[in-house]
Image (cartoon, rainbow, N blue to C red):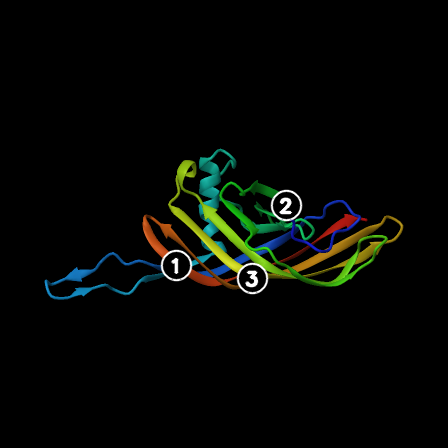
Amino acid sequence: MVIGTWATVQAQVIVPLEFNLSSTMMIQNPNFTNNGTTTIFPAPVRTPLTTLTLLPQLAADEFALGNYTNHSFPAGAHLALFYCSTNFSASHFAVIDSSGKVLVDVSDIMNIQVNGNKEVSSGKRTNATGLISGTTDAFLVRLNYDDTGAAGGSLIFMFEALLEASGGDTVLSTSTHTFRQNWSVRFVNGSGEGAVNGFDFVLHGTAWATGSGVFVY
């Protein structure tokens, strides 16, 4: 399924957005007690699941898979969602350094997909160039993470949310036909479930991503 009402006459535009996840895992506590009369299950263990906690694990996983040459990412590295508004299935995750250089594609562990059949959009598009302004898109998505198996990790989860994206183009030069495309993306009412170290959990939280890129029309 292609999500993206705003098809353009340009080549496919994929914009790198700095991605942030802020969520909390509620992990099943296995330390129940039973005195023969009453069984008591303790409160779940609440643990943050954020971009900062995922980055070190992604480095270790991609190193184990032979896709990255170090156990850790350099200072200033961050997780990026490479966002394609005209064909969302082309969107993917990678880790980039402070200058925007891709260090490693992490799609083998972390990916995102459309999780519904409907999209609501608004905004304006110039027919001749495909340039957009005041564009908004809203549709359901699902983020999947799995570093078990060959990567040797112990974390698997899915995170579902309503994606709301706002974007637009700014012409930088009419002579060179260059433009900047900006996007601000929110993941609203996010929730999901998974397992870590063999213990089940549910999670809730939010995510967001912002950024821009320069292209030719």
Give neighbour class at mark 3: few <14, some 14-19, many 20+ (Cα, 10 Å): some
Q: Position of residue 169 (x, y in %)?
A: 76, 58
Q: Position of residue 24 (x, y in %)?
A: 42, 62
Q: Position of residue 173 (x, y in %)?
A: 85, 53
In which quadrant of the rendered view does residue 33 lie? bottom left
Q: Amino acid under label 3?
A: Leu
Name of the residue lying farthest toward the front: 117
Q: Which mark is residue 83?
A: none
Can the viewer see residue 18?
A: yes
Name of the residue lying farthest toward the left: 36
Q: Which residue is mark 3?
A: 162
Q: Secondary structure at mark 1?
A: strand
Q: Position of residue 40 (x, y in %)?
A: 20, 65
Q: Which residue is mark 2?
A: 90
Question: Sequence-wise, which precedes: disc 3 or disc 1?
Answer: 3
Name of the residue lying farthest toward the top: 66
Between the residue at mark 1 and the residue at mark 2, the CA separation in whole angstroms equals 28 Å
Between the residue at mark 2 and the residue at mark 3, the CA separation in whole angstroms equals 18 Å
Q: Secondary structure at mark 2?
A: helix
Give neighbour class at mark 1: few <14, some 14-19, many 20+ (Cα, 10 Å): some
Q: Residue at x 76, y 48 (%)?
A: 215
Question: Sequence-wise, which precedes: disc 1 or disc 2?
Answer: 2
User: Is residue 39 shown above or below 127?
Assistant: below
Q: Which mark is residue 202?
A: 1
Q: Secondary structure at mark 3?
A: strand
User: Is residue 48 shown above or below 217?
Assistant: below
Q: Residue at x 44, y 46 (%)?
A: 57
